[in-house]
Amino acid sequence: VLAVWHQLTKTEIPELSKGSVVMRERRRVEETIRAMRRAGACRLQVISDFDMTLSRFAHNGRRVPTTHNILDNRLLINEECTKKMKELLNTYYPIEIDASRSAKEKLPFMVEWWTKVHELLIEQRIRKDMLAQAVKESRTMLRDGYKVFFDGLHESQVPLLIFSAGVGDVLEEVIRQNGVFHSNVHVISNYMDFDHAGVLRAFKGQLIHTFNKREGAVTQAAGLAQLHGRPNVLLLGDSLGDLTMADGVSDPHHVLTVGFLNDQVEERKELYMNAFDIVLVRDETMDVPNAILRNIT
Ligand code: TMP
Ligand code: MG
């Protein structure tokens, strides 16, 4: 039996043998993929994080901006605000990815970070009609193979839920400019609230940060009719907090989780291997998710 299982990954999904792929339980991965394929595309949904999961972590040795960092453009914010946001990033990002602290310990720091940044952005009176230009001028980049990913899901009518603690308006503009904002894409994120003149005055709804996605999953994702009747989930993320994005799925059958390990690799490898079914180490491509989807849809 084992020989047959191994054949599945070697011949049907050769991408799972890439050097960047680490799996604690290869057998479980194979069984889950098989079960998902038997159930078919009509029973599948994909739930993905955005920043540093669908978007690249780095390109040519330089960090690629997150949706928040795309806002760092003189069209939108002044130098003082840029400086303050950088200081906050330098303070809180190391906490976000600290392997020695639990999600529970990190949570209050994340609330602090997001709250402070959103206050700064509101002070800047950001204009809605400038967002598209800021995205154009940014160095934002989706992972290699993103087109196959988005187009393939659209063709096989599999809903894609993008669940992001970033800025929803910016995220939508990024995927729109890349030509992949298809009708099967649903977004849960922090959306800007503009006044009648198109000036930012607040953020809508409950704040989403890296470690409270479970709440958004239960209160928002669970209500999306397009996701009902799809108990099989392919989940993609880059943070341990992303693992709760599927918590709103009622009666899940098979859940396969893929974690992009971008940063603090040696420190976090063990943690990621214990938490995600498949870990992609410093892999800037969608090759593995695409190969899995090709196999099961
Ligand atoms: P995600 O849920 O789409 O990954 O978005 C959250 C990421 O955004 C998280 O990893 C930290 C990052 N972030 C910034 O880069 N700058 C900021 O100012 C804030 C608040 C978050
Ligand atoms: Mg992320």
Image (cartoon, grey):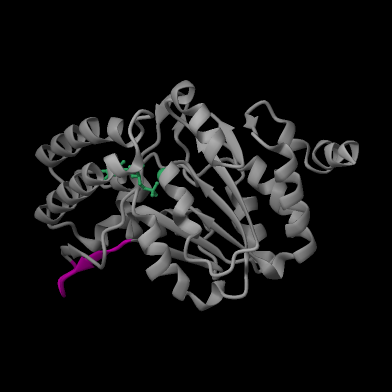
Query: Observer-nearest residue: 123 or 77?
Result: 123
Quadrant location, the C terminus = bottom right
Q: Which residues are magenta?
A: 190-198
Ligand 2 resides in the quarter of the picture at top left
Question: Which x, y percent locates residue 18?
Answer: 70, 30
Q: Does the stretch in magenta take in 42? A: no
Res 284 seen here: no
Q: Is residue 79 visible?
A: yes
x, y percent for residue 264: 42, 25
Query: Horizontal and vertical percent for residue 61?
Result: 44, 23
* Residue extending furthest toward the top: 266
Please report the residue visible at 36 percent of the width from the left and 43 percent of the height from the top.
66
In the image, what residue occupies the spot 66% across and 41% down?
288
Residue 112 spot, x, y in % from top left:
18, 46
Quarter of image, res 193: bottom left
How many numbered discs?
A: 0
Above-or-below relation of 17 to 135: above
Q: Foreground: 45 or 143?
A: 45
Locate residue 102 relative to residue 142 in the image: left or right: left
Q: Examine the rendered structure and indicate whether residue 192 appears above or below residue 53.
A: below
Residue 173 located left or right of residue 224: left
Task: Indicate whether 174 appears above or below 17.
Answer: below
187 to the left or right of 250: left
Magenta stretch contains residue 195: yes
Residue drawn at (78%, 53%), measured in percent from left and top?
34
Q: In what quadrant of the picture does the N terminus appear?
A: top right
